[in-house]
């Protein structure tokens, strides 16, 4: 594959990036070809040493999405970053997807539990309306206690979610750098 084919193929694969980012990346790879030619290498040798455009695309998109989630960590950005990192290699399917599913499951369970506890006084009132003769102070105080515990759990889950998102971002960065380093050697 010569320089023109390599850069054209890479440009087509990086359509998800902005035009300016693509131009910067293509300029960098064009410089690799110029440096290689100055060292006496052929365009085919240089293209082979750079790697396949599809692997370069995967690495660049993974880095791009991880950087994007660092600036704005919305659920959509986190999912895009996770899928981009998983796409780097089959090994990442197990290394990234397993912990991600476990983490999301624990966080969702925490939010649901806290919300259910917080809403327990409503269930007490529904029970009181449905069965008017069953009022007991124990039920009322227990539901208020659960409501307080639910509020504390929800406040805790807010911090756990923030901390987990930051940890996941660091984990994705580490994984991207590990794969990039592993591919070069």
Image (cartoon, rainbow, N blue to C red):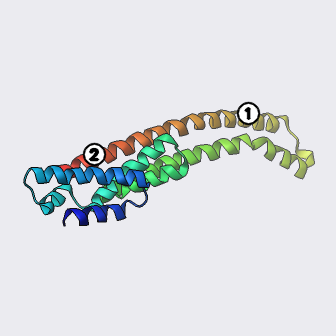
Density class for disc 1 (Cα within 10 Å; few <14, some 14-19, many ≥20) is some
State the image quarter where residue 56 is shown: bottom left
Residue 63 left/right relative to 53:
right
Instruction: Report the quarter where the N terminus lies.
Output: bottom left
Tell me residue 179's x, y (percent).
Answer: 27, 49
Say which quarter of the image contains residue 46. bottom left
**Could you tell whether 75 is left or right of 143 in the image?**
left
Residue 72 appears anywhere in the view: yes
163 and 28: which is toward the camera: 28
- Element under label 2? helix
Residue under the image location 54 percent in, 40 percent down: 161
Q: Which residue in the protein does label 2 denote?
A: 178
* Marks 1 and 2, the one that precedes in the sequence: 1
For this orientation, the residue located farthest to the left is 40
**Residue 95's disc number:** none
Residue 9: x %, y % from top left: 30, 65
Looking at the image, do the residues carrying marks 1 and 2 touch, with CB atoms under 8 Å apart? Answer: no
Relative image position of residue 77 (x, y in whole percent): 50, 50
Q: Nearer the viewer, mark 1 or mark 2?
A: 2
The residue tagged 1 is: 145
Residue 7 vs residue 130, the one in the foreground: 7
Q: Nearer the viewer, residue 177 or 39?
A: 39
Which residue: 53% across, 53% down?
Answer: 76
Q: Is residue 134 left or right of residue 176?
A: right
Q: CA distance from mark 1 to mark 2?
A: 48 Å
Asked where in the image residue 149 lies, by quadrant, the reply is: top right
């Amino acid at each position: 594959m010569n320089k023109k084919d390599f850069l054209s193929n890479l440009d087509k694969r990086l359509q998800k990036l902005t035009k300016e980012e693509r131009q910067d990346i293509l300029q960098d790879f064009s410089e690799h070809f110029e440096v290689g030619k100055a060292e006496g290498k052929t365009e085919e040798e240089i293209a082979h040493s750079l790697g396949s455009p599809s692997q370069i695309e995967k690495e660049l998109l993974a880095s791009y999405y991880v950087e994007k989630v660092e600036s704005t960590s919305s659920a959509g950005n986190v999912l895009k970053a996770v899928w981009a990192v998983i796409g780097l290699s089959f090994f990442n399917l197990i290394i990234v997807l397993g912990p991600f599913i476990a983490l999301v499951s624990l966080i969702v369970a925490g939010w649901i539990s806290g919300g259910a506890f917080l809403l327990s006084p409503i269930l007490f009132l529904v029970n009181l309306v449905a069965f008017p003769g069953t009022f007991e102070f124990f039920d009322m105080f227990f539901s208020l206690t659960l409501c307080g515990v639910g509020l504390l759990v929800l406040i805790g889950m807010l911090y756990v979610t923030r901390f987990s998102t930051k940890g996941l971002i660091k984990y994705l960065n580490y994984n991207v750098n590990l794969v990039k380093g592993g591919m070069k050697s």
